[in-house]
Image (cartoon, rainbow, N blue to C red):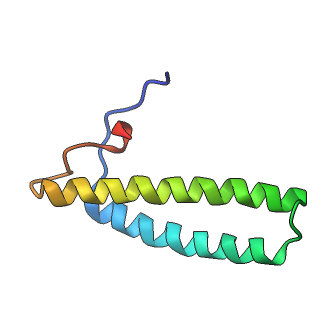
Amino acid sequence: MVKRSKRSLYPSDAAAMQEKVRAFHWEVRKWCGEIPLGSTVYVALEGLNSALELANRQLNGALDDARRDPAGHGRNGLEDF
């Protein structure tokens, strides 16, 4: 398994990143609706869509940790997902 860094993510940074991820995710889903199913572009956009869903879940986890531990960066960093 890949060794990950021990950096943590500030809750305010996670919230700002999540706003941008959600906006871009909406845009990608809109593009998917305009592309013919089964085309190589559609398949690539579906891969990007999956990655954006994962990023959004990880940011939600970081924000949940911050809510449980309001003293700082949250209990866990993104490396714990």
Please, which residue is most extreme toward the left here? 71
Which percent across, then down, holds residue 68?
A: 15, 56
Residue drawn at 59 percent across, 53 percent down: 51
Q: Is residue 80 above or below residue 19?
A: above
Q: Is residue 11 left or right of residue 28?
A: left
Please, which residue is most extreme toward the front here? 37
Q: Is residue 55 left or right of residue 36?
A: left
Q: Is residue 34 above or below residue 64?
A: below
Question: How many marks are shown on the rendered structure?
Answer: 0
Q: Quadrant of residue 6?
A: top left
Residue drawn at 43 percent across, 66 percent down: 18
Residue drawn at 86 percent across, 66 percent down: 37
The quadrant in which the C terminus is found is top left
Which percent across, then down, holds residue 75?
A: 19, 45
Residue drawn at 88 percent across, 60 percent down: 38
Which percent across, then down, holds residue 44?
A: 78, 55
